[in-house]
Image (tube, rainbow, N blue to C red):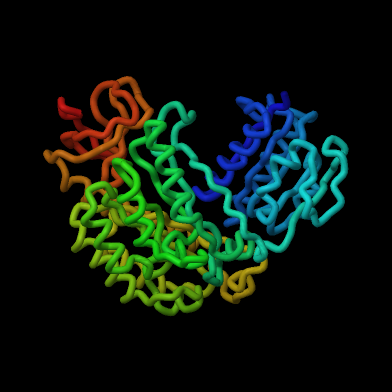
Amino acid sequence: MASFFVENFGCRATQADGAAIERQMLERGLARAEAAAQAQVVVLNTCTVTASADQDVRSSIRRIHRDNPGCQIIVTGCYAQRAPEELARIPGVNWVVGNSHKHAIAEVACNSAPANSFVPLESFAAAQGQILVGDIFAHTELLAAPVFDADTASEKTRPNLKVQDGCNNRCSFCIIPSVRGRSRSLASDEVVREVNALVAQGYREVVISGINLGRWGRDLLQPGKFAALLHAILDRTSLERLRISSVEPMDWTDEVIDIVSSAERIAKHAHAPMQSGSDRVLRLMHRKYRPWHYADKLRKLRAAMPSAAIGADVMVGFPGETDEDFEETRALVAELPFTYLHVFTYSARPGTPAAAMANQVPGPVARERNRILRELAQEKKLTFQRMFIGAAISTITLTHFDGQHTETLTDNYQKLFVSGRHQANQIGSAIVESVSTEGMFGTLLPDS
């Protein structure tokens, strides 16, 4: 029996794609190896959102080829879609399969050519640097399989289910639409089926995600809205806790906010990418909202959910970002009720409008801005967490035990370490006793 190993890079959507590839490989009779060094077929499921993401992939290819020269290396994902020739030239790469043909990975690995190949496929064992990439905008496949936070699925903690892929936006800095294609959704019935299957396996919290999750359903034959999907999961499954990943700010509609705030089974957690607090920079980015629109959404979220985690992605160093622009961002972050931030330094992506813009921000300047926002975010996080000292809070136990504490994740997305060793995947209540930069510390209540 041939063995395989899938190595994933990047975002939750990429990890979900990797889980779907693994599912396909197992269905075709291949055996999962414990590591790339032990596999006959290695699939690198790549990210290309930054230059460093590309470098990580190239380094991994060279390492795998050095340590396991006899294995077949298949490179797929976003980097493969963007620059297949570049990857095909790297020694050890047998196949480069773009996102357009990611659904054919198992066929390629099993030495059976898909019917709609864009290149002549030779014997798999003899292939060197073969490329299988097509028009991503003609792509209608959506690989769907849950991906797990734990090292093994048997730990039963917080699977992530991708229900939407692709993006119809055209942000000037972002390469993702050109490597993932148009927005496409997993039908509501299929989402419900996947969630019910996870519940049957014992999972108690499921995270739904997508590249542009709030646009779910707009592309279906019978179009639907994201709010309808939330209702379907609540009404047609017995899932104890549903968590929503990132949703674009203008898709946090009043209806979605009402559902999330009022449904006890939906985690009190909202992530809304901001990118910049400067109106001028947002226009250069081709974002579809202004800073005051964004601020209004966050204030509505906080009013509806006083104890919710509220987070954002913020980019620093976008081409032409001045000190004044950055100060507008810093001031808006300071003003709004954030509990955490993901701060990114701009990375030029070939083929995007922003890469050709003048006034690229020097690296040291961008890194300093990054540091300032990270420190501000840490202060806001600690201030938020201190509000809960002495209070009981709902939490789910995870797998990590450091000898004294078991790691848990609260309903409102805080890391909480509780005294003692506890079985994973248990939802209960804990008393918060102290807070540090490492997280919150407390004790599970006896009935938990």
Q: Residue at x 67, y 64 (%)?
A: 138
| Quadrant including the C terminus | top left
Q: Position of residue 103 (x, y in %)?
A: 66, 48
User: Quarter-wise, where is residue 389 in the image?
Assistant: top left
Q: Indicate left or right for 428 with 425 as reference.
A: left
Q: Residue at x 82, y 48 (%)?
A: 130
Residue 248 lies left or right of residue 50; in this view the side is left
Q: Position of residue 107 (x, y in %)?
A: 73, 41
Residue 141 vs residue 294, the one in the foreground: 141
**On screen, residue 291 above or below 167:** below
- In the displayed structure, 425 sits above or below 232; it is above
Q: Quadrant of the N terminus?
A: top right
Does residue 348 show up? no
- Farthest residue, direction left: 390
Q: Where is residue 369 shown, x and y percent of the image?
A: 42, 61
Return the x and y of residue 198 as percentages of the image width and height. Answer: 42, 37
Q: Which quarter of the figure has residue 119? A: bottom right
